[in-house]
């Protein structure tokens, strides 16, 4: 663990953070992708795997199960994540969010019938997600270079370590190992993958169809999304183009002719 | 409880325009602008009796009226805007608009009653505000609404969208990094223009065969 963290800080020290508010700096920061050719090759592999396996499964799952049943599955899978979310709430020094997570887990596991019903949200305890990658970010570890992981998809050294730590510290993993039920681990991973993929089908199909460079779009979206969840939503405003990025609008002289005659 | 939730969602959509007025006129105006934009998009783009060409024309009009197209286009070209010649800029802005129209017009085809709820509007300065909205997806297993921020600018009494931020990801920043990646690979702005032209044509061709 300590060795991992040490290695991680060495890697992330190489990543220079641009000055905040600089639009061009943001673009260059997005390009922090020194192994882009390899990443693109792995991305192509992941897409082929997605087309061959995950996407067809997700389509069948979406078309066969009614929305009511899929929502129950999604809730139960979210509920299984609660212990990891709780641990990371605590590690990030967020007692209120930790308490919310704990209460949600107790309420949904009992009244919500094993997590199938998200009763907690209906009584005002909305769900939030955390992971060890976010915790490392809160502790000041930089994201480092962009990495495309086989199967798992977009990541970076910090989030890759986070993913491994979350997996190994999850009580579910320990229960499954001790009870000698490795299939439970595979079943959960498979269900999570298919459930998430089914919800994203429309969005990724649109993005794939309309983007000029799907790889670059996914890279940018991943970076921005991670920055937003690390700030628990507060960072979203900062992720937008800064005011000086829009020098021509609006002007004080009144409405500008924007539409143009094409 | 589920029925109550559905009912509340229906009410929210019905009274989309009737969101509470805030003390700040800029925030209030920005909220009204986003509400009416959503209503306008749904009424003008989801009618089953409209042909695709009609919807394309409607969407282009809406996009030009309600989005600061030139400003967004300039931002998405990033540093390359300064290197572009006058002719390249003109051509780029035209192709950028074409791509946005081609990309988004068909997304309303599968409209399934998604509702837009205004959460709040926050003034960024004296002429810019961010409107926070929640979009509910009736067909998604995950019941959490999608958080969409609308970055809006005001000039005199005209409001225009400057950026749309979906779950923390800015559309302008995403397009900017895509475009700069294409320019790097093709080696020139002319290369990007060619790719833009090709992409719009591909989308149109695919839409015609469906």
Image (tube, coloured by chain):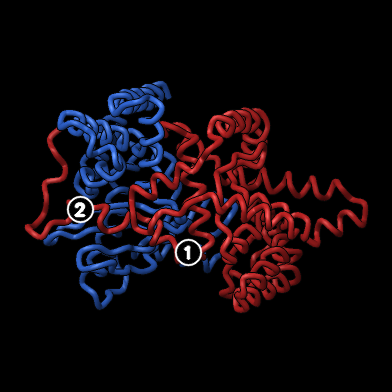
Chain colours: A red, B blue
Q: Name the residue under label 1.
A: A233
Q: Is mark 1 on a helix, strand or loop?
A: loop
Looking at the image, is A151 positioned above or below residue B30? above
Residue A125 occupies which quadrant of the picture? bottom right
Residue at the image position 50 percent from the left and 49 percent from the top? A223
Residue at the image position 39 percent from the left and 67 percent from the top? B119
Label 2 with label 1: CB-CB less than 8 Å: no
Position in image of residue B58 (x %, y %): 24, 39
Q: Name the residue under label 2.
A: A247
Q: Is residue A116 visible in this depiction of the protein?
A: no
Position in image of residue A12 (x %, y %): 57, 52
Mark 2 closeness class: few <14, some 14–19, many ≥20 residues within 10 Å? few
Q: Quadrant of the N terminus of chain A?
A: bottom right
Earlier in the chain: of badge 2 and badge 1, it is 1
Residue A105 occupies which quadrant of the picture? bottom right
Question: What chain does mark 1 sit on?
Answer: A
Position in image of residue A251 (x %, y %): 13, 56
């Amino acid at each position: 663990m300590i060795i991992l963290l040490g290695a991680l800080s060495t890697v992330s020290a190489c990543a220079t953070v641009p000055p905040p508010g600089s639009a061009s700096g943001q673009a260059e920061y997005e390009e922090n992708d020194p192994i882009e050719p390899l990443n693109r090759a792995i991305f192509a592999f992941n897409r082929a795997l997605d087309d061959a396996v995950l996407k067809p499964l997700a389509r069948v799952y979406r078309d066969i199960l009614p929305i009511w049943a899929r929502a129950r599955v999604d809730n139960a899978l979210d509920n299984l994540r609660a212990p990891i979310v709780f641990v990371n709430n605590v590690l990030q020094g967020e007692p209120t969010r930790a308490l919310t997570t704990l209460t949600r887990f107790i309420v949904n596991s009992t009244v919500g019938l094993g997590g199938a019903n998200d009763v907690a949200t209906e009584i005002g305890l909305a769900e939030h997600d955390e992971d060890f990658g976010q915790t490392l970010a809160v502790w000041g570890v930089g994201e480092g270079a962009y990495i495309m992981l086989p199967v798992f998809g977009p990541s970076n050294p910090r989030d890759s370590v986070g993913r491994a730590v979350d997996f190994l510290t999850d009580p579910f993993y320990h229960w499954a190992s001790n009870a000698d039920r490795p299939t439970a681990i595979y079943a959960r991973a498979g269900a999570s993958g298919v459930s998430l993929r089914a919800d994203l089908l429309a969005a990724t199909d649109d993005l794939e169809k309309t983007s000029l460079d799907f790889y670059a779009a996914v890279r940018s979206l991943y970076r921005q999304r991670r920055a937003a969840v690390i700030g628990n939503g507060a960072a979203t405003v900062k992720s937008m183009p800064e005011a000086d990025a829009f020098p021509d609008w609006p002007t004080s002289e009144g409405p500008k002719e924007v539409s143009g005659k094409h | 409880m589920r029925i109550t939730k559905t009912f509340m969602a229906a009410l929210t959509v019905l009274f989309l325009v009737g969101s509470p007025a805030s003390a700040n006129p800029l925030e209030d105006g920005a909220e009204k602008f986003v509400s009416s934009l959503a209503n306008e998009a749904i009424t003008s783009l989801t009618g089953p009796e409209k042909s695709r060409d009609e919807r394309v024309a409607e969407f282009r009009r809406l996009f030009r009226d309600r989005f600061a197209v030139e400003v967004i286009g300039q931002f998405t070209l990033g540093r390359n805007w300064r290197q572009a010649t006058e002719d390249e800029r003109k051509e780029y802005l035209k192709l950028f608009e074409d791509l946005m129209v081609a990309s988004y017009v068909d997304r309303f085809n599968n409209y399934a009653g998604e509702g837009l709820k205004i959460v709040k509007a926050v003034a960024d300065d004296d002429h810019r505000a961010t409107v926070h909205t929640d979009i509910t997806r009736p067909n998604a297993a995950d019941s959490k609404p999608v958080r969409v921020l609308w970055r809006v600018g005001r000039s005199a009494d005209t409001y225009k969208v400057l950026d749309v931020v979906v779950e923390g990801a800015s559309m302008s920043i995403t397009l900017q990094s895509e475009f700069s990646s294409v320019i790097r690979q093709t080696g020139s702005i002319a290369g990007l223009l060619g790719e833009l032209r090709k992409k719009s044509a591909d989308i149109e061709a695919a839409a015609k065969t469906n």
